[in-house]
Image (cartoon, grey):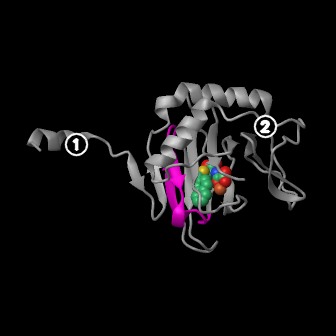
Protein backbone atom coordinates (compact mmCIF):
# COMPACT_ATOMS: atom_id res chain seq x y z
CA UNK A 1 0.00 0.00 0.00
CA UNK A 2 1.29 3.40 -0.90
CA UNK A 3 0.59 6.56 1.09
CA UNK A 4 -1.72 7.60 -1.76
CA UNK A 5 -3.70 4.32 -1.42
CA UNK A 6 -4.03 4.78 2.35
CA UNK A 7 -5.20 8.34 1.82
CA UNK A 8 -7.76 7.21 -0.77
CA UNK A 9 -9.02 4.48 1.60
CA UNK A 10 -9.35 6.96 4.47
CA UNK A 11 -11.50 9.21 2.25
CA UNK A 12 -13.89 6.39 1.30
CA UNK A 13 -16.87 6.30 3.65
CA UNK A 14 -17.22 2.94 5.44
CA UNK A 15 -20.57 1.58 4.47
CA UNK A 16 -20.80 -1.54 6.63
CA UNK A 17 -21.19 -0.89 10.37
CA UNK A 18 -21.72 -3.73 12.82
CA UNK A 19 -24.46 -2.81 15.28
CA UNK A 20 -23.64 -5.16 18.12
CA UNK A 21 -23.66 -8.93 17.74
CA UNK A 22 -25.75 -10.12 14.76
CA UNK A 23 -26.83 -6.78 13.28
CA UNK A 24 -25.13 -5.06 10.34
CA UNK A 25 -25.92 -1.64 8.87
CA UNK A 26 -25.25 -1.39 5.12
CA UNK A 27 -25.36 2.37 4.57
CA UNK A 28 -26.78 3.30 1.16
CA UNK A 29 -26.99 -0.32 0.01
CA UNK A 30 -30.45 0.17 -1.54
CA UNK A 31 -29.49 3.24 -3.59
CA UNK A 32 -28.29 1.16 -6.54
CA UNK A 33 -31.88 -0.15 -6.93
CA UNK A 34 -33.67 3.04 -5.91
CA UNK A 35 -35.84 3.54 -9.01
CA UNK A 36 -37.06 -0.09 -9.33
CA UNK A 37 -37.72 -0.23 -5.56
CA UNK A 38 -39.84 2.93 -5.58
CA UNK A 39 -41.71 1.78 -8.67
CA UNK A 40 -42.39 -1.60 -7.02
CA UNK A 41 -43.65 0.04 -3.80
CA UNK A 42 -46.13 2.09 -5.85
CA UNK A 43 -47.31 -1.01 -7.75
CA UNK A 44 -47.84 -2.96 -4.50
CA UNK A 45 -49.73 -0.07 -2.89
CA UNK A 46 -52.02 0.12 -5.95
CA UNK A 47 -52.98 -3.57 -5.53
CA UNK A 48 -52.93 -3.77 -1.71
CA UNK A 49 -53.35 -0.24 -0.31
CA UNK A 50 -51.62 0.82 2.92
CA UNK A 51 -54.00 0.58 5.87
CA UNK A 52 -53.88 1.23 9.62
CA UNK A 53 -54.15 -2.10 11.40
CA UNK A 54 -55.61 -2.49 14.87
CA UNK A 55 -53.68 -4.16 17.69
CA UNK A 56 -55.25 -7.11 19.55
CA UNK A 57 -55.88 -4.58 22.35
CA UNK A 58 -57.97 -2.40 20.00
CA UNK A 59 -55.49 0.44 19.32
CA UNK A 60 -55.15 1.83 15.77
CA UNK A 61 -51.48 1.76 14.71
CA UNK A 62 -50.04 5.13 13.60
CA UNK A 63 -47.93 3.31 10.97
CA UNK A 64 -49.87 2.20 7.87
CA UNK A 65 -48.99 -1.26 6.53
CA UNK A 66 -49.30 -3.55 3.54
CA UNK A 67 -47.46 -6.67 2.35
CA UNK A 68 -45.98 -8.43 -0.65
CA UNK A 69 -45.11 -12.09 -1.04
CA UNK A 70 -46.70 -15.47 -0.26
CA UNK A 71 -47.27 -14.41 3.37
CA UNK A 72 -48.25 -11.09 4.90
CA UNK A 73 -48.20 -9.89 8.52
CA UNK A 74 -51.58 -8.84 9.87
CA UNK A 75 -52.96 -7.71 13.22
CA UNK A 76 -56.55 -7.54 14.39
CA UNK A 77 -58.62 -8.21 17.51
CA UNK A 78 -57.72 -11.93 17.23
CA UNK A 79 -53.95 -11.32 17.43
CA UNK A 80 -50.87 -11.10 15.18
CA UNK A 81 -50.23 -13.65 12.43
CA UNK A 82 -48.96 -14.27 8.89
CA UNK A 83 -51.73 -14.80 6.34
CA UNK A 84 -51.52 -15.60 2.60
CA UNK A 85 -54.67 -13.52 1.98
CA UNK A 86 -55.11 -9.74 2.23
CA UNK A 87 -58.12 -9.45 4.57
CA UNK A 88 -59.20 -6.17 2.90
CA UNK A 89 -59.48 -7.65 -0.61
CA UNK A 90 -59.82 -11.40 0.00
CA UNK A 91 -57.04 -11.90 -2.59
CA UNK A 92 -53.41 -13.05 -2.16
CA UNK A 93 -50.85 -10.32 -1.41
CA UNK A 94 -49.00 -9.01 -4.51
CA UNK A 95 -45.94 -11.11 -5.40
CA UNK A 96 -42.46 -10.10 -4.27
CA UNK A 97 -41.05 -7.92 -7.07
CA UNK A 98 -37.70 -9.06 -8.56
CA UNK A 99 -35.95 -5.87 -7.31
CA UNK A 100 -37.13 -6.62 -3.73
CA UNK A 101 -35.90 -10.19 -3.94
CA UNK A 102 -32.50 -9.23 -5.42
CA UNK A 103 -31.89 -6.62 -2.74
CA UNK A 104 -32.94 -8.78 0.22
CA UNK A 105 -30.92 -11.80 -0.91
CA UNK A 106 -27.81 -9.71 -1.65
CA UNK A 107 -27.96 -7.80 1.66
CA UNK A 108 -28.42 -10.97 3.71
CA UNK A 109 -25.53 -12.69 1.93
CA UNK A 110 -23.27 -9.68 2.48
CA UNK A 111 -24.10 -9.71 6.20
CA UNK A 112 -23.26 -13.41 6.54
CA UNK A 113 -26.58 -15.13 5.76
CA UNK A 114 -26.09 -16.80 2.35
CA UNK A 115 -29.15 -18.74 1.20
CA UNK A 116 -31.66 -16.46 2.95
CA UNK A 117 -34.79 -16.35 0.76
CA UNK A 118 -37.72 -14.29 2.11
CA UNK A 119 -41.36 -15.28 1.68
CA UNK A 120 -42.81 -12.09 3.20
CA UNK A 121 -42.23 -8.36 2.88
CA UNK A 122 -44.00 -6.06 5.33
CA UNK A 123 -44.17 -2.47 4.09
CA UNK A 124 -44.54 0.18 6.81
CA UNK A 125 -45.51 3.75 5.88
CA UNK A 126 -44.73 6.52 8.38
CA UNK A 127 -45.87 10.13 8.33
CA UNK A 128 -44.55 12.82 10.65
CA UNK A 129 -45.67 11.80 14.16
CA UNK A 130 -45.98 8.09 13.31
CA UNK A 131 -44.10 5.81 15.69
CA UNK A 132 -43.54 2.16 16.45
CA UNK A 133 -43.42 1.26 20.12
CA UNK A 134 -40.78 -1.09 21.51
CA UNK A 135 -41.49 -4.71 20.48
CA UNK A 136 -39.91 -8.02 19.50
CA UNK A 137 -40.49 -9.74 16.14
CA UNK A 138 -41.36 -13.32 17.05
CA UNK A 139 -44.23 -14.32 14.76
CA UNK A 140 -41.89 -16.04 12.27
CA UNK A 141 -41.48 -19.83 12.35
CA UNK A 142 -37.65 -19.95 12.45
CA UNK A 143 -36.21 -17.21 14.67
CA UNK A 144 -32.71 -18.34 13.62
CA UNK A 145 -33.26 -16.64 10.25
CA UNK A 146 -32.52 -12.92 9.83
CA UNK A 147 -34.76 -9.98 8.94
CA UNK A 148 -33.57 -7.51 6.29
CA UNK A 149 -34.87 -3.93 6.60
CA UNK A 150 -34.73 -1.18 3.98
CA UNK A 151 -35.34 2.49 4.78
CA UNK A 152 -36.78 4.82 2.11
CA UNK A 153 -37.88 8.45 2.27
CA UNK A 154 -37.56 10.81 5.24
CA UNK A 155 -35.14 9.91 8.08
CA UNK A 156 -36.12 8.05 11.23
CA UNK A 157 -34.52 7.47 14.61
CA UNK A 158 -34.48 3.73 15.23
CA UNK A 159 -34.51 2.44 18.83
CA UNK A 160 -32.46 -0.68 19.50
CA UNK A 161 -32.85 -2.24 22.94
CA UNK A 162 -31.88 -5.53 24.49
CA UNK A 163 -33.47 -8.90 25.14
CA UNK A 164 -35.59 -7.50 27.98
CA UNK A 165 -38.05 -4.65 27.52
CA UNK A 166 -36.37 -2.69 30.32
CA UNK A 167 -32.80 -2.96 28.91
CA UNK A 168 -31.07 0.26 27.79
CA UNK A 169 -31.99 1.46 24.29
CA UNK A 170 -29.54 2.88 21.77
CA UNK A 171 -30.56 5.27 18.99
CA UNK A 172 -29.58 4.65 15.37
CA UNK A 173 -30.44 7.19 12.65
CA UNK A 174 -31.70 5.51 9.46
CA UNK A 175 -31.90 7.39 6.17
CA UNK A 176 -33.04 6.77 2.61
CA UNK A 177 -31.19 3.80 1.13
CA UNK A 178 -29.93 2.29 4.39
CA UNK A 179 -30.29 -1.48 4.74
CA UNK A 180 -29.95 -3.34 8.05
CA UNK A 181 -29.66 -7.10 8.49
CA UNK A 182 -30.81 -8.37 11.89
CA UNK A 183 -29.89 -11.94 12.74
CA UNK A 184 -28.21 -14.13 15.31
CA UNK A 185 -28.11 -12.59 18.77
CA UNK A 186 -29.83 -9.40 17.51
CA UNK A 187 -32.91 -11.20 16.24
CA UNK A 188 -34.92 -11.08 19.47
CA UNK A 189 -33.82 -7.66 20.69
CA UNK A 190 -36.55 -5.15 21.46
CA UNK A 191 -36.74 -2.33 18.94
CA UNK A 192 -38.94 0.52 17.79
CA UNK A 193 -39.02 3.86 15.98
CA UNK A 194 -39.32 7.31 17.61
CA UNK A 195 -42.08 9.62 16.35
CA UNK A 196 -40.97 10.92 12.94
CA UNK A 197 -40.10 14.59 12.67
CA UNK A 198 -41.70 16.62 9.89
CA UNK A 199 -39.42 16.42 6.85
CA UNK A 200 -39.48 16.15 3.08
CA UNK A 201 -37.95 13.64 0.71
CA UNK A 202 -37.66 14.44 -2.97
CA UNK A 203 -39.03 11.09 -4.16
CA UNK A 204 -41.52 10.20 -1.40
CA UNK A 205 -42.67 13.57 -0.01
CA UNK A 206 -43.50 13.79 3.73
CA UNK A 207 -43.23 10.07 4.22
CA UNK A 208 -40.97 7.16 5.18
CA UNK A 209 -41.42 3.65 3.85
CA UNK A 210 -39.67 0.76 5.59
CA UNK A 211 -39.50 -2.68 4.00
CA UNK A 212 -38.82 -5.71 6.20
CA UNK A 213 -38.04 -9.00 4.49
CA UNK A 214 -38.74 -12.14 6.45
CA UNK A 215 -38.89 -15.88 6.03
CA UNK A 216 -42.12 -16.32 7.96
CA UNK A 217 -43.30 -19.79 7.00
C1 LIG B 1 -34.30 -5.75 15.15
N1 LIG B 1 -40.00 -2.04 11.64
O1 LIG B 1 -41.72 -3.97 11.00
S1 LIG B 1 -36.99 -1.97 10.79
C2 LIG B 1 -41.13 -4.09 12.09
O2 LIG B 1 -38.50 0.98 10.71
C3 LIG B 1 -40.19 -3.04 12.52
O3 LIG B 1 -40.43 0.14 10.27
C4 LIG B 1 -39.19 -0.89 11.97
O4 LIG B 1 -39.68 -3.11 13.59
C5 LIG B 1 -39.37 0.13 10.89
O5 LIG B 1 -41.28 -5.07 12.84
C6 LIG B 1 -37.79 -1.24 12.17
C7 LIG B 1 -35.64 -2.64 11.64
C8 LIG B 1 -35.86 -3.96 12.35
C9 LIG B 1 -36.73 -4.90 11.89
C10 LIG B 1 -36.82 -6.12 12.52
C11 LIG B 1 -36.00 -6.42 13.61
C12 LIG B 1 -35.06 -4.24 13.43
C13 LIG B 1 -35.11 -5.46 14.06
C14 LIG B 1 -36.04 -7.67 14.26
C15 LIG B 1 -35.20 -7.94 15.30
C16 LIG B 1 -34.33 -6.96 15.76
FE1 LIG C 1 -40.00 -5.10 14.41
Residue 214 is situated, as x and y percent measured from the top left of the image, at 64, 50
Q: Which mark is residue 164?
A: none
Tag nearer the camera, 1 or 2? 2
Residue 106 is situated, as x and y percent measured from the top left of the image, at 49, 41
Q: Which residue appears at 54% of the width and 59% of the height?
A: 183
Whether residue 181 is visible to the viewer of this picture, yes or no, is yes
Q: Is mark 2 within 8 Å of ligand 1?
A: no
Q: Which residue appears at 59% of the width and 62% of the height?
A: 144
Whether residue 203 is visible to the viewer of this picture, yes or no, is no
Q: Which residue appears at 66% of the width and 31% of the height?
A: 41
Q: Give the residue furthest to the left.
A: 2
Is 88 drawn above or below residue 59 in the view shown? Answer: above
In the image, taking residue 199 as reference, residue 88 lies left or right, namely: right
Q: CA distance from mark 1 to mark 2?
A: 44 Å
Element class at badge 2: loop
| Image quadrant in which the N terminus is located | top left
Q: Which residues are magenta?
A: 170-190
Among the 4 quarters of the image, the one containing residue 210 = top right
Element class at badge 1: helix
Residue 153 is situated, as x and y percent measured from the top left of the image, at 58, 35
Looking at the rendered structure, the number of numbered marks drawn on it comes to 2
Quadrant position of ligand 2? bottom right
The answer to whether residue 177 is magenta is yes
The answer to whether residue 9 is magenta is no
Q: Which residue is mark 1?
A: 9
Circle 2 Cα neighbour tier, 10 Å, few/some/many (<14 / 14–19 / ≥20): many
Q: Which residue is mark 2?
A: 93
Do residues under tags 1 and 2 come within 8 Å of each other at their CB atoms? no
In front of the other: 157 or 82: 82
Q: Earlier in the sequence, mark 1 or mark 2?
A: 1
Circle 1 Cα neighbour tier, 10 Å, few/some/many (<14 / 14–19 / ≥20): few
Q: Which residue appears at 72% of the width and 34% of the height?
A: 95
Amino acid sequence: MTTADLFAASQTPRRDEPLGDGAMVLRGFALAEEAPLLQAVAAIAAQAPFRHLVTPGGLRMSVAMTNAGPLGWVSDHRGYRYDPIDPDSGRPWPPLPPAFMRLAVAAAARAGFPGFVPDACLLNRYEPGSRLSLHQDRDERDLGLPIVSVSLGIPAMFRFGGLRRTDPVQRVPLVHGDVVVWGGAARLRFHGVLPLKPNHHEALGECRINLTFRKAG
